[in-house]
Amino acid sequence: NIIKSIIEQGIRKKVFRKVDPELMMATLIGTINQVLLSQSMCNMLLQQEKDFDPYTNEKFRKRLITHLKQMTHAYLLNN
């Protein structure tokens, strides 16, 4: 898996903290799945109306990308 390889390489190079690569992947993929693959779950979590469409909402897409980047940086990067 390419994501696992990137994480393991970052750990070896001491760019990333020692984390569990499989669980880090599960965290990223789980977030994406819950938010993007389940519109009803997404709407519930975000307290949106039923007609909110996370798939086409550009503002939400940018918000999700920013969140995933911040979460990944905070969890992986050595400071």
Image (cartoon, rainbow, N blue to C red):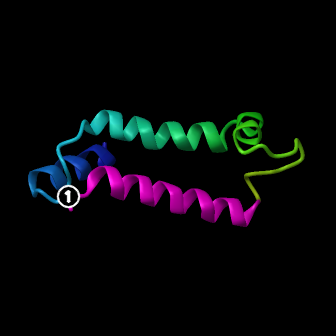
Q: Residue at x 35, y 58 (%)?
A: 73
Name the residue beneath numbered marker 1. 78
Q: Residue at x 18, y 55 (%)?
A: 10
Give the residues in magenta.
Answer: 57-79
> Residue 35: image x %, image y %?
64, 42
> Residue 22: image x %, image y %?
31, 34
Q: Is residue 65 magenta?
A: yes
- Where disc 1 sits, the SS reads loop
Quarter where residue 39 is shown: top right
Q: Quadrant of the C terminus?
A: bottom left
Residue 40 lies left or right of residue 17; in this view the side is right
Q: Residue at x 54, y 60 (%)?
A: 65
**18 shown above or below 22:** below
> Could you classify mark 1 by the number of other residues whose Cα lies within 10 Å: few (under 14), some (14-19), or many (20 or more)?
few
> Residue 20: image x %, image y %?
25, 36
- For the residue pair 6 and 76, the one nearer the viewer reads as 76
Amino acid marked by disc 1: Asn
